[in-house]
């Protein structure tokens, strides 16, 4: 019997999916804490996002009279689609039954599904800020998705597969070589991650100015558990991109089997990599300022250009050679 089809393998796949739920708020809290320390502030506890989610989950949910059933369903669809997309990205090990669906095309499709329902919910009530945030979100996604696909396809061409598990396994077995194509793809995907997760310089997740908001503008009419699910989905999305960058470009440490020692090393490795990425994100948000909305397309065009240069570098330097 295949080891990836045993009950223990399915149990580990469930545990890996639950780790995304458990660790996503902690990553946001870690970034906020490091950011506060860099700004000479004490800052809230890294566990504050857990308290915020708990408070929202037990609060009464209020819905506008003009809202349709879509407004009530959207938080659940956004949360589940984002969670399933994250669960498809290898976190601790690549030797799981879910590795079959860990494809970059599936990942982009699930994130697009969540985004569509998020924007429809923002426009559903009919408020000016919700519609404005929805239009901005779709503009950003239309420019971010091609750059993301181009960056990951650069790696996929090396492994001859769009499956994330196969790509990671290929790089683990490959001799370390500092390829220009990887550097360009890494830079392009990093810029896309900042824009897609609503972080500085593309957006400011802590702003309270409606005219500058993108993601938060679509959530102004939500409250209670609906708002908790939306916020939790945003936290999972940030961790998803962090794991994608960490395990695809720096795959060392991830387990290739289900041995307890390998799994322990894989968990420790991804936690260290996420901590390092959180510090880098906090440092970038401290040093940089939010750019004007009309400069975001140029920001994402740069991401697309870097990803395209990575693809061309692979074709010219590696395939051509």
Image (cartoon, helix red, strand yellow):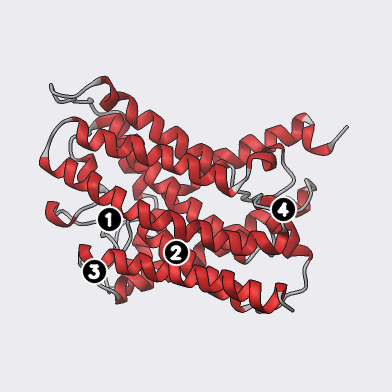
Residue 273 percent location from the top left of the image: 56, 64
Residue 235 percent location from the top left of the image: 40, 48
Q: Is residue 308 left or right of residue 100?
A: left
Q: Is residue 193 left or right of residue 268?
A: left
Q: Name the front one of labels 3 and 2.
A: 3
Q: Name the front one of labels 1 and 3.
A: 3
Relative height, residue 131 to residue 151 (above, below): above
Q: Where, quadrant-wise, is the C terminus in this rendering?
A: bottom right
Residue, disc 4: 166
What is the distance, in whole Å, between disc 3 and disc 4 at their CAs? Answer: 37 Å
- Whichever of callouts 2 and 4 sits on the residue coming sooner in the sequence is 4
Residue at 40% from the left image edge and 30% from the top image edge: 77
Q: Secondary structure at mark 3?
A: loop
Residue, disc 2: 278
Q: Residues within 10 Å of mark 3 (few under 14, many from 20)?
A: some
Q: Secondary structure at mark 1?
A: loop
What is the distance, in whole Å, between disc 1 and disc 3 at their CAs? Answer: 13 Å
- Whichever of callouts 3 and 4 sits on the residue coming sooner in the sequence is 4
Residue at 68% from the left image edge and 38% from the top image edge: 12
Residue, disc 3: 291
Q: Name the front one of labels 1 and 2.
A: 1
What is the distance, in whole Å, between disc 4 and disc 1 at their CAs? Answer: 34 Å
Pointers 4 and 1 in contact (CB under 8 A)? no
Q: Secondary structure at mark 4?
A: helix
Q: Where, quadrant-wise, is the N terminus in this rendering?
A: top right
Quadrant of res 13: top right
Q: Secondary structure at mark 2?
A: helix
Q: Which mark is residue 205?
A: 1
- Whichever of callouts 4 and 1 sits on the residue coming sooner in the sequence is 4
């Amino acid at each position: 019997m295949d080891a990836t089809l045993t009950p223990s393998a399915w149990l580990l796949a469930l545990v890996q999916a639950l780790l995304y739920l458990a660790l996503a708020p902690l990553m946001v809290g870690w970034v906020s804490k490091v950011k506060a320390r860099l700004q000479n502030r004490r800052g809230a506890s890294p566990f504050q996002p857990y308290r915020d989610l708990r408070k929202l989950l037990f609060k009464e949910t209020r819905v506008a009279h003009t809202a349709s059933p879509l407004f009530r369903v959207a938080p659940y669809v956004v949360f589940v689609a984002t969670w399933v997309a994250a669960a498809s990205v290898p976190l601790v090990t690549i030797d799981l039954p879910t590795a079959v669906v860990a494809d970059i095309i599936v990942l982009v499709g699930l994130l697009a599904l969540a985004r569509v329902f998020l924007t429809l919910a923002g426009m559903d009530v009919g408020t000016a800020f919700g519609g404005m945030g929805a239009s901005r979100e779709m503009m950003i996604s239309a420019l971010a998705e091609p750059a993301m696909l181009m960056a990951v396809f650069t790696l996929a061409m090396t492994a001859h597969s769009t499956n994330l598990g196969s790509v990671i396994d290929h790089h683990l077995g490959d001799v370390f070589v500092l390829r220009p194509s990887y550097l360009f793809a890494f830079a392009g995907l990093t810029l896309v991650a900042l824009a897609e997760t609503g972080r500085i310089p593309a957006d400011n997740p802590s702003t309270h100015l409606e005219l500058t908001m993108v993601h938060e503008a679509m959530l102004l009419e939500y409250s209670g558990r609906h708002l908790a699910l939306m916020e939790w989905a945003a936290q999972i999305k940030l961790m998803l991109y962090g794991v994608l960058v960490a395990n695809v470009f720096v795959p060392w440490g991830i387990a290739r089997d289900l041995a307890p020692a390998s799994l322990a090393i894989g968990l420790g490795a991804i936690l260290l990599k996420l901590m390092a990425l959180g510090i880098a994100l906090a440092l970038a948000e401290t040093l940089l300022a939010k750019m004007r909305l009309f400069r975001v397309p140029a920001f994402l065009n740069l991401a697309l250009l870097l990803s395209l240069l990575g693809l061309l570098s692979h074709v010219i330097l590696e395939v051509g050679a």
